[in-house]
Amino acid sequence: MDKVMFDIVDEPIQVGELIEKVTRREAGAITTFLGTVREWTKGRRTLYLEYQAYKPMAVKMLEQIGKEIKEKWENTEVAITHRVGRLDLSEVAVAIVVSSPHRKAAYEANEYAIERIKQIVPIWKKEHWEDGETWIGDQLEQVPYPDGEPTKIGKGDMS
Amino acid sequence: MITVLLFAQLQDSIGKEQIEMEASNISISELKERLKSTYNLPQIDHVMISVNEEYALPGDMLSSGDVVALIPPVSGG
């Protein structure tokens, strides 16, 4: 397939174009997940986010996730685009689309993709809060580092 | 020569996107130790390492020309 199914971009994500990439006659379901910029996190207000990626490796890891999905769920097509740079509130940071003949696989595979992104894809998010800034350093987003430095190893399977 | 790429908080704390190191035939653990003492990076114990865009293990050996990246816990999505 010549289409770019896994991509890192610095412009707004065109969700319609992404959906077209997985649209095909065998499909009876297409699930779309959009990760968007949230204003409030545990009482703290976000003004905007900044994402950074190790681009060539991030694309490779997205491709790997695509491969894992095809092994786990038969006859699925996956496309993922992650955006980097500055993102304002409600903008789309990541879009995942999965098509499959029946809806169950499309739902399950889509959730699997976002979980794996948070484990293995070298992309980092910097929160620009109302009262400071922090690189978020934990895959599960449970442990921000107030000094901007990790103090413990993150959970998650990094294999 | 080994190229070391820095991201996120590591990039901020060193103030560079990459470092060139005169080294070959050293393990990833040895490279980490060197970086830690040269640049005062205590947090390096908690980063993953990739070599030429693939995740690598502490015992893996590096050769001249390799591109190493220090990968702090990721937070995409």
Image (tube, rainbow, N blue to C red):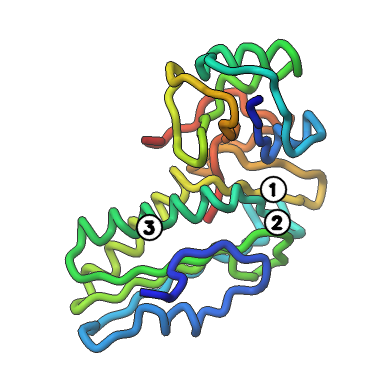
Judged left or right of residue A147, residue A122 is left
- From what the image shows, is residue A82 above or below residue B37? below
Q: Secondary structure at mark 3?
A: helix
Subunit bearing disc 2: A
Callout 3, which amino acid? Ala
Callout 2, which amino acid? Answer: Leu
- Residue density around tag 3, few if under 14, some if 14–19, many if 20 or more, within 10 Å: many
Residue at disc 2, secondary structure: strand
Mark 3 vs 1, N-terminal side = 3
> How busy is the neighbourhood of tag 2: few (under 14 within 10 Å), some, or many (20 plus)?
many
Left or right: where A57 falls relative to A108? right
Which residue is nearer to you in this view: A136 or B61?
A: B61
Which disc is residue A113 wearing? Answer: 3
Q: Residue at x 46, y 64 (%)?
A: A6
Question: What percent of the width, then of the height, locates residue B5?
Answer: 66, 36
Q: Earlier in the sequence, mark 2 or mark 3?
A: 2
Residue labelled with disc 2: A49
